[in-house]
Image (cartoon, rainbow, N blue to C red):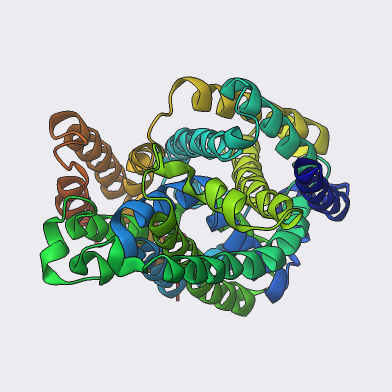
């Protein structure tokens, strides 16, 4: 009987989501950028829910379970990273106001670099989507333990696709508003229950050593559970990869105006930190009452199963599903826009063909989740290598008129080579993210600057880029 009540709660929320999202786009402009008319509240909601995805949720909560409150340093990554986005590119992206972020590289430098950037970003987003589907599968496996995981992943991929197909980004934004309202209530509630339950069982101090109850003491720099050198690299990488994120750029293009875009990203940085922070702390409290989980990545669904009452439990699972819907839908629509615009595919400018592209992307994402993804967090980080390589070309495209196409190309090639080389030579066990981020990113910028200077000197003039810049 309890199972049926949970099922009813889940489907009631999903049906609400489908009904709200069901608005058919009548033009490619509606499908891809929601008529460029999204106001502040829905833009904040969609930005928060785009970032609040199941992959990061499972990865962060698993570390909250194993490392305790010190894992709050992980949500801090987004607070700082999105604040950097707000300060450096939120207004310039809206001023640029195209459909795909890769158009910047084509217009500011060369069409060839624009297409190359699009290929790299599409490859990265395919990897991201695979981790999102994998995490969604892991979340729901405890409810259907006898079902093969590939079948569960396929079922939810189809369901996400059905919600997004009618209106593209228009549907995504509308569903995000519903998901956001429920999420900002559900996750603090989960934390409140966790605090109450764990206090009755001895509290966090009964499980975690003293250094794990603090967020950033010096001795945590090389802590075996969550070394803070690793967190530092994530902060740096997030700052220099999110600026090129196509799913964020597309939603900035959909904003009503520059002020709305700027304010929405600033607010979303705080809200994303709060929501992930609540989940990390709830997972830490769950360890007090359930200290022997075989797979900490399953802590979120298990918390909901154990702590939430019948019916509410189903809604809680629906919130997790909604997080996957919004993120997957946003990334898929951004990818579809890039395929249509950056490769000059005229057929992609129709709503019907955009829907065909979304279906193809869903299949590719499911295949990646089924056959390629094991550890979610490591694969999420690895997929950022091509995105980080674009950082100099992007920031210089907005803020330095002296950057040349040769400098942009050189920085991208060096960035790709350094990231892949760090992974191949140092590896995950060796902590490749440190040399990749801390040495690689400065090298990307030095390469871009020096090559641009040499290129301009070789041509006998101080050329200034005549493309987009932030004035």
* Image quadrant occupied by the C terminus: bottom left
Instruction: Look at the picture and state if 265 lies above or below 415.
Output: below
Position of 261 with respect to 233 (left or right) is right
The quadrant where residue 186 appears: bottom right
Rendered location of residue 19, percent (x, y): 88, 51
Between 265 and 203, the residue placed more toward the observer is 203
Q: Whole-percent x and y of residue 359?
A: 71, 28
Image: 357 above or below 438: above
For the residue pair 459 and 257, the one nearer the viewer reads as 257
Give the residue drawn at x 40%, y 64%.
Answer: 75
Query: Residue 458 at x, y = what percent?
Result: 17, 49
- Closest to the observer, 285 or 367: 285
Tell me how many marks there are. Answer: 0
Front residue of 334/281: it is 281
Quadrant showing the N terminus: top right
Q: Residue at x 60, y 28 (%)?
A: 145
Residue 403 visible within the image: no
Q: Position of residue 378 (x, y in %)?
A: 33, 39
Q: Is residue 55 visible?
A: yes
Residue 219, image quadrant: bottom left
Residue at the image position 62 percent from the left and 46 percent from the top: 324
The residue at 31%/45% (across/down) is 389
């Amino acid at each position: 009987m309890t199972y049926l009540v949970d099922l009813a709660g889940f489907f009631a929320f999903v049906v609400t989501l489908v009904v709200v999202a069901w608005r058919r786009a009548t033009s490619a402009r509606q499908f891809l950028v929601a008529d460029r008319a999204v106001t502040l509240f829905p833009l904040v909601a969609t930005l928060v829910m785009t970032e609040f995805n199941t992959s990061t949720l499972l990865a962060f909560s698993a570390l909250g379970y194993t490392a305790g409150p010190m894992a709050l340093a992980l949500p801090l990554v987004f607070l700082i990273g999105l604040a950097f986005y707000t300060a450096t590119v939120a207004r310039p992206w809206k001023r640029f106001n195209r459909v795909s972020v890769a158009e910047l590289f084509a217009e500011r430098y060369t069409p060839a670099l624009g297409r190359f950037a699009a290929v790299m970003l599409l490859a990265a987003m395919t990897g991201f989507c695979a981790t999102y589907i994998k995490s969604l599968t892991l979340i729901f496996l405890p409810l259907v333990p006898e079902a093969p995981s590939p079948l569960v992943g396929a079922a939810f991929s189809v369901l996400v696709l059905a919600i997004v197909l009618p209106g593209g980004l228009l549907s995504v934004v509308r569903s995000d508003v519903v998901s956001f309202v429920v999420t900002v209530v559900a996750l603090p509630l989960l934390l409140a229950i966790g605090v109450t339950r764990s206090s009755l069982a001895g509290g966090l101090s009964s499980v975690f050593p003293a250094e794990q109850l603090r967020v950033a003491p010096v001795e945590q720099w090389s802590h075996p559970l969550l070394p803070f050198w690793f967190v530092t690299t994530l902060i740096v990488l997030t700052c220099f990869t999110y600026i090129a994120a196509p799913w964020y750029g597309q939603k900035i293009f959909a904003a009503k105006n520059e002020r709305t875009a700027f304010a929405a990203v600033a607010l979303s940085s705080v809200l994303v930190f709060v929501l992930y922070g609540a989940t990390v702390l709830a997972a830490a409290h769950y360890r007090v009452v359930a200290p022997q989980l075989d797979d900490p990545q399953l802590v979120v669904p298990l918390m909901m199963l154990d702590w939430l009452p019948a019916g509410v439990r189903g809604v809680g699972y629906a919130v997790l599903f909604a997080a996957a819907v919004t993120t997957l839908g946003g990334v898929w629509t951004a990818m579809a826009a890039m395929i249509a615009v950056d490769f000059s595919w005229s057929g992609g400018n129709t709503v019907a063909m955009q829907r065909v592209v979304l279906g193809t992307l869903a299949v590719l994402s499911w295949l990646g989740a089924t056959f390629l993804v094991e550890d979610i967090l490591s694969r999420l980080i690895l997929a950022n290598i091509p995105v980080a390589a674009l950082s100099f070309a992007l920031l210089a495209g907005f803020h330095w008129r002296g950057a040349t196409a040769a400098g942009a190309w050189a920085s991208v090639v060096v960035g790709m080579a350094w990231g892949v080389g760090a992974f191949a030579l140092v590896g995950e066990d060796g902590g490749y993210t440190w040399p990749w981020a801390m040495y690689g990113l400065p090298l990307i910028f030095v390469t871009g600057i020096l090559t641009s200077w040499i290129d301009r000197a070789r041509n006998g003039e101080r050329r200034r880029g005549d493309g987009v810049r932030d004035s």
